[in-house]
């Protein structure tokens, strides 16, 4: 089950990034062209937050099973580039903070009445979240911890 979650978590990162970037561009073009906040845009807002929440749930399932997180390596906690430290503290903190920002941004955008303010809210909160997620992801070129772009079963 652990490896199944790892493969899903790795793949869903692309959905998280894709939906977030699409939502940010939707908000940008809505602001620039003074568009109405249509039901389709509302669905983009909703699904961006939902995909992030699915990733959070899989991340939590991974966190309680991961041999890297569970490893008892008290003597090697000195560096952020240590995979144990990265996944136990850094990755989860940045990712949870990003998902909280997405949740707040989505909830605020839902409640606000003015269409332009809805777009501005989505743009600000989602952009901040994207920035944190890009740092949190263990890209193959990341100096913090390197993992593949995709895993297969
Ligand atoms: C936007 C949210 C997140 C993204 C984009 C993301 C992305 C990733 C990626 C790409 C990996 C590497 C997978 C691989 O080795 O192929 C990973 C690993 C991991 N993630 Fe996340 N993650 C997110 C949120 C979370 C959260 C919230 C948690 C914990 C609650 C979490 C826990 C983990 C753990 C424990 C691993 C390492 C598992 C292992 O190698 O044993 N992730 N994550």
Image (spheres, rainbow, N blue to C red):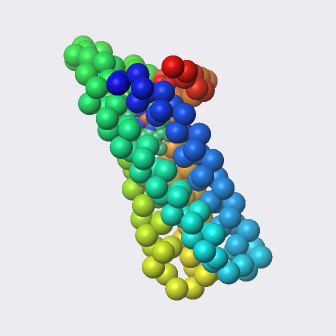
Residue 41: % across, % down: 62, 69
In the image, what residue occupies the spot 38% across and 38% down?
Answer: 58
In the image, what residue occupies the spot 59% across and 62% down?
Answer: 44
The image quadrant where one finds ligand 1 is top left
Quadrant into which the N terminus falls: top left
* 36 relative to 3 in the view: left or right: right
How many marks the image carries: the answer is 0
Residue 82: % across, % down: 39, 19
Residue 131: % across, % down: 55, 48
Residue found farthest to the bottom: 113
Work out whether residue 124 can be spotted. no
Residue 70: % across, % down: 25, 22
Depth order, front residue of 41/28: 41
Depth order, front residue of 128/9: 9
Work out whether residue 70 can be spotted. yes
In the image, what residue occupies the spot 59% across and 53% down?
Answer: 20
Depth order, front residue of 90/61: 61
Residue found farthest to the right: 33
Above or below — where is 105 with respect to 138?
below
Res 62 → quadrant:
top left
In the image, what residue occupies the spot 48% across and 66% down?
Answer: 106
* 51 relative to 21 in the view: left or right: left
């Amino acid at each position: 089950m652990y490896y199944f979650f790892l493969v899903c978590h790795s793949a869903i990162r692309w959905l998280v990034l894709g939906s977030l970037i699409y939502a940010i561009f939707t908000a940008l073009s809505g602001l620039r062209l003074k568009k109405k906040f249509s039901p389709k845009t509302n669905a983009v807002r909703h699904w961006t937050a939902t995909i992030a929440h699915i990733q959070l749930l899989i991340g939590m399932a991974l966190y309680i099973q991961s041999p890297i997180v569970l490893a008892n390596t008290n003597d090697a906690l000195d560096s952020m580039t240590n995979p144990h430290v990265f996944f136990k503290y850094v990755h989860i903190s940045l990712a949870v903070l990003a998902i909280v920002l997405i949740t707040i941004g989505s909830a605020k955008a839902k409640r606000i009445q003015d269409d332009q303010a809805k777009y501005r809210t989505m743009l600000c909160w989602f952009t901040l979240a994207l920035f944190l997620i890009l740092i949190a992801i263990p890209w193959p070129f990341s100096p913090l911890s390197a993992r593949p772009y995709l895993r297969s079963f």
